């Protein structure tokens, strides 16, 4: 895959749709080999490849930095977790997994309530969905949970007075991510993994027809 031809919008769409449930890459691989890119085009391609391949590592790195910044602010920690959750459920795979786990947990206590949390059926015309498949969480549109989690997290940020702290911590986490993605040399395993995930996406779309 030629990452130089991948736009930022394509990368964001890929990160939104790809499966985030996979475990992070081993630290021995994450800190394996670093080199300076030979040109701006090489740097651009390397940055996009590493952001996609090490996405889980970068996400955990930012959460870890935020956690260290709020050791003395319990409300800020909850706000950070809710903010991270509201961002994570924008990913289709994570939203589906999150909804399924919540529904199974509720089903253990109230099967009747769990039945109401099932997503509505998508109408099918001539063997194909009539529109792009909408994402539901516990029977409600995804944006409802994004709005709720974002609103609660904003209130907790305001109460804990930790907004400035999170901005510094977030800036440090993003800078560390940018530096690692810029200087970590993409390996053959990263490229093979990209091709494998592309094949799975194509096969999934073909099986839905």
Image (cartoon, rainbow, N blue to C red):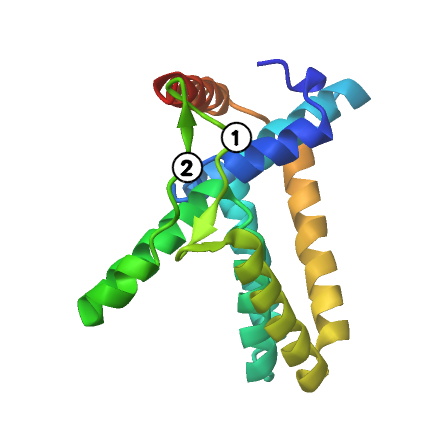
Q: Are marks 1 and 2 in contact (CB under 8 Å)?
A: yes
Taking depth in this image into account, of 39 and 203 the one nearest to the observer is: 203
| Depth order, front residue of 75/27 | 75
Query: Residue at 35% of width from left, 59% of height from top?
Result: 117
Helix, strand or loop under label 1: loop
Is residue 90 rendered to the left or right of residue 113? right
Q: Residue at x 55, y 83 (%)?
A: 74
Location of the C terminus by quadrant is top left
Is 136 placed left or right of 55 in the picture? Answer: left
- Position of residue 123 relative to residue 141, above or below, is above
Q: How far from the left and from the top, in percent, is residue 208?
A: 37, 22
SS label for mark 2: loop
Seen as rendered, the residue at the extreme right is 40
Q: Quadrant of residue 116?
A: bottom left
- Residue 20, percent from left and from top: 45, 42
Residue 113 screen position, x and y as percent: 28, 66
Q: Residue at x 33, y 53 (%)?
A: 118
Q: Which is nearer the N-term, disc 1 or disc 2?
A: 2
Q: Count of labels shown?
A: 2
Residue indicated by mark 2: 122
- In front: 38, or 52? 52
Number of other residues with Cα within 10 Å of mark 1, as a class: few under 14, some 14 to 19, many 20 or more: few
Residue 104 image label? none
Instruction: Using the image, determine if residue 58 lies above or below residue 133.
Output: below
Name the side, left or right, on which 131 lies relative to 5: left
Q: Residues within 10 Å of mark 2 (few under 14, many from 20)?
A: few
What quarter of the picture does the N terminus occupy? top right
Label number found at residue 131: 1
- Residue 48 visible in image: yes
């Amino acid at each position: 895959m030629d990452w130089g031809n991948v736009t930022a919008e394509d990368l964001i769409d890929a990160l939104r749709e790809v499966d985030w449930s996979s475990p992070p890459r081993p630290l021995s691989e994450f800190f394996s080999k670093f080199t300076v890119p030979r040109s701006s085009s090489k740097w651009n391609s390397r940055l996009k490849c590493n952001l996609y391949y090490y996405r889980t590592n970068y996400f955990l790195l930012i959460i870890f930095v935020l956690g260290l910044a709020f050791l003395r602010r319990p409300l800020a920690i909850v706000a950070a977790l809710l903010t991270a959750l509201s961002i994570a459920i924008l990913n289709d795979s994570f939203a589906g997994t999150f909804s399924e786990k919540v529904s199974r947990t509720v089903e253990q206590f109230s099967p009747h309530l769990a039945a109401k949390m099932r997503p509505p059926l998508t109408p099918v015309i001539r063997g194909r969905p009539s529109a792009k498949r909408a994402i539901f969480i516990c029977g409600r549109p995804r944006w409802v949970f994004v709005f709720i989690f974002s609103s609660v997290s904003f209130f907790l940020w305001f109460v804990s007075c930790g907004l400035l702290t999170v901005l510094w911590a977030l800036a440090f986490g993003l800078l560390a991510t940018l530096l690692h993605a810029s200087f970590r040399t993409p390996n053959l395993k990263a490229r093979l993994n990209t091709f494998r995930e592309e094949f799975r996406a194509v096969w999934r779309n073909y099986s839905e027809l």
